[in-house]
Amino acid sequence: MVQEIIRIEGLECNHCVVRVGRAIASVQGVMEVDVNLEKREAVVNFEETRTNMGKIRTAIREAGYEPL
Ligand SMILES: [Cu+2]
């Protein structure tokens, strides 16, 4: 399991936090996600054998936000 911190552009309220958190959590292999509104970032724990940063970043984009 690895942990990555992803800065996310476009997070403005708790709805954004819930939306992007669900999007990240829906990626197969993601075990835990914590989105911080003030820091504009997500802490993501995932199984590196099952997913990767590319897939997680794609899920963030598809939810309407921009991973930095
Ligand atoms: Cu919002």
Image: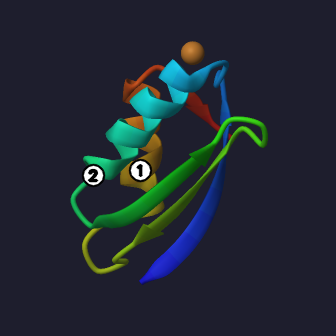
Mark 2 is surrounded, within 10 Å at the Cα level, by few (under 14), some (14 to 19) or many (20 or more) other residues, namely: some
Seen at 64% across and 25% down, the residue is 11
- On the image, the x and y values in percent for residue 19 come to 41, 28
Q: Residue 42, relative to residue 22: is it above or below?
A: below
Seen at 29% across and 80% down, the residue is 49
Left or right, 68 with respect to 45, comes to right
- On the image, the x and y values in percent for residue 61 come to 46, 29
- On the image, the x and y values in percent for residue 13 come to 62, 19
Question: Does the beta carbon of the residue at mark 2 sit less than 8 Å from ligand 1?
Answer: no
Q: Amino acid at mark 1?
A: Ile
- Which mark, residue 27? 2
Left or right, 67 with respect to 32, comes to right
Q: Nearer the viewer, residue 15 or 48?
A: 15
- On the image, the x and y values in percent for residue 58 come to 40, 39
Which quarter of the frame holds ligand 1? top right
Q: CA distance from mark 2 to mark 1?
A: 7 Å
Left or right, 29 with respect to 66, comes to left
User: Mark 1 falls on what kind of element?
Assistant: helix
Q: Quadrant of the N terminus?
A: bottom left
Residue bearing the label numbered 1: 56
- Which mark, residue 12? none
In the picture, residue 38 is in which quadrant? top right
Left or right, 62 with respect to 5, comes to left
Q: Amino acid at mark 2?
A: Val
In the picture, residue 14 is in which quadrant? top right
